[in-house]
Amino acid sequence: MTEARSGEPPFFVSAALLPRENVGMRERLQAIFGHHPDLIEERQTVYTTLLDVFAQTYGRQERVALVRAPARLNLKGVHVDHRGGYVNYLTIDREIAMAVSPREDDTVVLHDLESDRFGPRAFRIGDDLPAGARGRWLSYIEQVRPVPGDWANYVKAAVLRLQDHYADRPLRGMNLLVAGNIPLAAGLSSSSALVVAACEGCLWVNGLTLSNEQKALLCGEGEWYIGTRGGAGDHAAMIFGRRDHLIRLRFFPLTVEPVAFPSGYRVVVCNSLRQAHKADGAKSTFNERVATYEIGMLLLRQAFPDLAGRLTHLRDINAEQLGLDEADVYRMVAALPERVTRADLLQRLPAHRETLERLFNTHREPLDGYRVRAVCLFGLAECERSRMYADVLTRGEMETVGRLMELSHDGDRVVTFDGNGRPRPWGHPVTDAYLRSLVADAQSRDPVRTQRARLWQQAGGYGCSCEELDQLVDIAKTVPGVVGAGLTGAGLGGCVLALVQDGFTDALIEAVTARYYAPRGLSPSAMVCTSVEGAGRVF
């Protein structure tokens, strides 16, 4: 063990100093993973191997730290963290772990524990982000062209964003060895976990400290380096995560509330094994949906100038915030076009040409136009659903919890499956006639009709599911003990999560194995999750 710097805990530099009988290390791992001996044993084995291979790769180092960032599950609040909506996360027992040591130069050297999976990489901070370009992150990322699909991009995202933040202080480089067991392109945010872990490592080697809020925001903005334009919800969930708690958070400003996860329920993740790679066409679709939200807000501010000053984020459009009733909200949605082309937008919003062109540059133009009305109705309703979720979960109102999850997935859904397993196209009604019917129901005094017209009851149409995810959700819904199910992450592939009563997890896994994996000739890929602590240094 080397001598720690003043105010720091000691750091182990060899796997020989990570024994099973080390009481302090056992307590540290229990604080992260809970009283799960098998999980702790598995993680300690990985950490020991990581340190051994690190020493073989880089030689003996005077100072070494181990940092980690867990996968996250978003139980409610999909596609709305960047709209100011609530998101409700769990951090789970899949993670990115890194052994880290400081360098004397500004080079960052990367190796993966499984060298046949990701090859070694190296970059110089000063080459990628010269001193004269620092302090202007948005301008920088609009000009940079990272190599598509390169895993080093996610480490660069964290390191370069930190260097931009500390514009007047050149950062030192680091040696990294990475180990991860988060399924790739599965909606569990393996990419964001790599960003967060790299951020933790870079801060440590440079002796820097940021608040959790600052880390979350910088990691979210850092990932824009890759070309996506999402929010920082995933990063914040990983950083603020608490074992056995749901993390209810919202941005603008960032608020974080840990909520005890109810006993008697487990979360099961079923991987569709269809990957949604952000490096290819999926990235364009993700960015298109985000741009559609922005377009909708521009159009609403133009259509309702008296309210424009109060419409900062999509979440602001609700009856309570605006002092209106839900019928008025639907009238506002009806003012949006069902579909609109880029040419039409430039004609409608001539004063916003620069903003529009910046949005257009992030994705390919949709062939059938931007589905502004469907996407915005989904976002408005999902903001309401995500606001309600933690409260109804805490109160044990599981029928409502299931309904919230079902409606969210329906807003993303592309097909539905009948009892014989045959898919049928799924529609997202947002016509004038449909909205008029909602207005009429909202204004009626019939409790059944008014309940049906509640904003949270509207699915809308974000449309980022796929046939595989839809089938997994429809199978899960038939299994006794399943409260609700829906996609997690950005969609277009990846995973479905299901909230399940204790004692019924095996039945769900058996059902998806028999009805989804086996007919496709796939090895079953479903796991019962354990809630763990959020990101940080292990030692």
Image: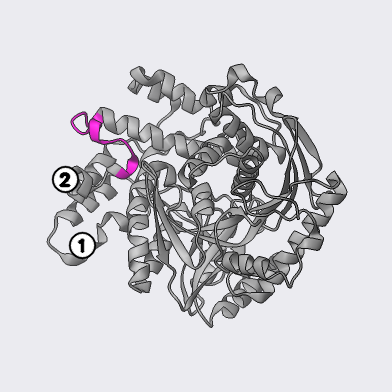
Position of 31 relative to 353 (above/below): below
- Three-letter amino acid code of the residue under disc 2: Gly
Identify the residue at image location x=25%, y=57%.
454
Which quadrant of the figure has residue 95? bottom right
Q: Does dot 1 land on a helix, a strand or a loop?
A: helix
Left or right: where 329 falls relative to 119:
left
Of mark 2 and mark 1, the one earlier in the sequence is 2
Q: Does the magenta stretch include residue 310?
A: yes
Residue 277 lies, in percent from the top left, at: 64, 45
Other residues around mark 1 within 10 Å, as few (<14) / some (14–19) / many (≥20): some
Left or right: where 261 falls relative to 147:
left
Residue 506 lies, in percent from the top left, at: 60, 79
Report which residue position mark 2 lands on. Answer: 323
From the image, which quarter does the N terminus lie in?
bottom right
Position of 80 relative to 342 (above/below): below
Left or right: where 45 falls relative to 77:
right
Identify the residue at image location x=71%, y=34%.
173
**Disc number placed over residue 523 in the picture, else none:** none
**Disc number placed over residue 449 in the picture, else none:** 1
Q: Residue furthest left?
A: 445
From the image, which quarter does the C terminus lie in?
bottom right
Residue 180 lies, in percent from the top left, at: 70, 55
Identify the residue at image location x=22%, y=42%.
331
Q: Does dot 2 land on a helix, a strand or a loop?
A: loop
Query: What segment is highlighted magenta in the picture?
Result: 303-315
- Three-letter amino acid code of the residue under disc 1: Arg
Residue 74 lies, in percent from the top left, at: 49, 57
Q: Is residue 154 magenta?
A: no
